[in-house]
Image (tube, rainbow, N blue to C red):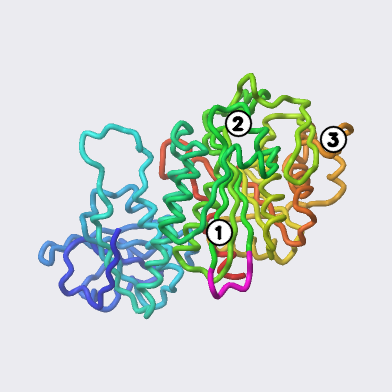
């Protein structure tokens, strides 16, 4: 989608989008469109309402959009996403978005981002009788009183572009999105956006002592890839570490899953989030240094698969008793956290993972579970999430839960085997591999990375966390 900023609509022909706040009286049209009148009984700007006016003389179609009285960022984003997602037939190659006085910059960003997100389609492998619409040929023109309208709109597009990439990474099938695919994606994106990327294959991972990471991978014919990305900015005063769980498919291993396995292509949602966020921060040129580690494996079933009751090593030197091979995500994260903390001086480190069903049992699909030993970091994550509806909410990291992960035969076990506090005990396991770093956060996105939505008939990716991390980094 191409952007264009206009001073007036005098020569424009095509679809004109005009959003309105809800009012008691008749809506007031922005300057240049005062010749249009609509009765308050027909349209008053109520949330999710629409009204269409065809102007054949000027070769225009006016689509009036109701935002409600005090619309939030995500409300506006979804209103505009519905247009390109569900009303494609009314959109030709030209759209004009007209913003009135009083509509703040975040709403313009949300509108542009939403229009771009709505172009996403799940039918990646469908045979089409007619060619799908090429949205690259669509020009979005904007009229706004905001002096920085161009910069705001460009940012909205960049946010959407990173989220669209994240959608695709999660939604594509596991025979396409393999560990190697993700490594190649990282390299290609790094080259495009100026991010330094290196990847450890199996041999290099062995040399680095990534034993827990390799244990999960040993049952798969697909070679594991340990991705390291470095984004640097000359004005940075902070160095942040990100770790994303990249299990490209999770059978559960020898503790094989008995239900829901068809959706386990989403088990690299944390990795996709981190990769998408790295693209976006480089695209926006945020003044912060970020190092990301994305361990990618497939947890398969084979005669070489690691076993329940195995004792494995780890990058940290700790030994781990395997109680459940389906508690594999925390194993690769353990090595990811240990590696990034030992090799980099980080002000804060954040890991993101589709980790536990327990997080879903606690919060459903409304928000992610947050664990942190840094109150300020926790609060900033909560505030950042609330602003854009990528909500995270804290659960405790009390040491009372630490003993649940005690092992008699090894330093720690990977699962406590009890039907309670699963998300918390998982977080305590991860904390054991943070080398007592004073500013760490773990975000369990099991319920928010992938699910039902109004934009697809089947479960699909949400790109949860990409914008959240950027919002956090903007405010560091």
Discs 1, 3 touching: Cβ within 8 Å? no
Quarter of image, res 138: bottom left
Q: Which residue is mark 3?
A: 410
Task: Residue 71: say if magenta.
Answer: no
Image quadrant holding the N terminus, namely: bottom left
Quarter of image, res 230: bottom right
Q: CA distance from mark 1 to mark 3?
A: 34 Å
Relative to 321, 257 lies left or right: left
Give the vertical position of 162 relative to 209 (above or below).
below
| Chief secondary structure of the magenta portion | loop
- Residue extending furthest top? 303
Task: State the image coordinates of residue 136 (x, y, percent, origin top left).
Answer: 27, 54
Magenta residues, start to end: 233-239
Task: State the image coordinates of residue 397 (x, y, percent, origin top left).
Answer: 79, 52
User: Which sits in the foreground, 345 or 208?
Assistant: 208
The secondary element bearing badge 1 is classed as: strand
Task: Residue 234: say if magenta.
Answer: yes
Give the vertical position of 273 relative to 46 (above or below).
above
Q: Residues within 10 Å of mark 1 (few under 14, many from 20)?
A: some
**Badge 1 or badge 2: first in the primary sequence:** 1
**Badge 2 or badge 3: first in the primary sequence:** 2
Q: Residues within 10 Å of mark 2 (few under 14, many from 20)?
A: many
Task: State the image coordinates of residue 252 (x, y, percent, origin top left).
Answer: 63, 28
Discs 1, 2 touching: Cβ within 8 Å? no
Residue 448, visible in the rendered structure: no
Q: CA distance from mark 2 to mark 3?
A: 23 Å
Q: Which residue is mark 1?
A: 230
Q: What is the number of the mark on residue 299?
A: 2
Relative to 379, 107 lies left or right: left
User: Which sits in the foreground, 425 or 203?
Assistant: 203
Name the residue rendered at 65%, 56% in the picture. 350
């Amino acid at each position: 989608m191409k952007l264009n900023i206009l001073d007036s609509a005098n020569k424009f022909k095509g679809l004109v989008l005009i959003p309105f706040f809800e009012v008691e009286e008749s809506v007031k049209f922005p300057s240049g469109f005062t010749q249009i009148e609509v009765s308050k009984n027909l349209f008053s700007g109520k949330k999710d309402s629409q009204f269409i006016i065809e102007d054949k003389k000027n070769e225009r179609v006016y689509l009036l959009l109701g935002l409600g009285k005090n619309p939030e960022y995500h409300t506006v984003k979804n209103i505009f996403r519905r247009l390109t997602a569900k009303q494609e037939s009314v959109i030709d190659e030209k759209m004009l978005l007209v913003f009135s006085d009083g509509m703040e910059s975040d709403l313009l960003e949300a509108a542009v981002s939403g229009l771009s997100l709505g172009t996403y389609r799940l039918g990646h492998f469908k045979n089409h009788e007619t060619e799908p619409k090429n949205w690259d040929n669509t020009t979005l023109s904007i009229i706004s009183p905001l002096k920085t309208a161009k910069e705001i709109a460009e940012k909205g597009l960049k946010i959407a572009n990173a989220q669209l990439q994240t959608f695709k990474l999660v939604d594509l099938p596991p025979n396409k999105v393999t560990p190697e695919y993700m490594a190649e994606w990282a390299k290609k994106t790094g080259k495009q956006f100026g991010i330094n990327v290196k990847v450890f294959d199996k041999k290099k991972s062995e040399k680095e002592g990534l034993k827990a990471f390799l244990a999960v991978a040993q049952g798969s014919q697909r070679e594991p890839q340990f991705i390291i990305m470095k984004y640097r900015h000359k004005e940075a005063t902070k160095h942040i570490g990100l770790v994303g769980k990249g299990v490209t498919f999770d059978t559960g291993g020898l503790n094989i899953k008995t239900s829901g396995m068809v959706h386990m292509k989403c088990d690299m949602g944390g990795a996709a989030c981190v990769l998408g966020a790295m693209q976006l921060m480089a695209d926006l040129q945020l003044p912060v240094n970020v190092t990301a580690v994305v361990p990618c494996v497939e947890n398969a079933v084979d005669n070489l698969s690691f076993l329940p009751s195995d004792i494995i090593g780890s990058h940290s030197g700790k030994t781990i008793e395997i109680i459940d091979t389906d508690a594999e995500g925390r194993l690769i994260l353990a090595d990811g956290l240990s590696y990034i903390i030992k090799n980099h001086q980080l002000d804060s480190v954040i890991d993101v993972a589709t980790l536990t069903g327990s997080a879903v049992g606690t919060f459903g699909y409304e928000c992610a579970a947050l664990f942190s030993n840094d109150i300020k970091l926790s609060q900033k994550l909560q505030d950042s999430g609330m602003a854009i509806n990528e909500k995270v909410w804290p659960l405790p990291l009390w040491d009372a839960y630490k003993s649940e992960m005690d092992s008699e035969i090894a330093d720690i076990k990977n699962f406590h085997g009890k039907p309670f506090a699963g998300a918390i005990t998982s977080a305590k396991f991860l904390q054991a591999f943070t080398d007592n770093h004073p500013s760490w956060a773990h975000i369990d996105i099991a319920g928010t990375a992938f699910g039902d939505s109004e934009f697809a008939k089947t479960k699909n990716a949400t790109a949860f966390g990409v914008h959240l991390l950027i919002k956090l980094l903007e405010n560091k």
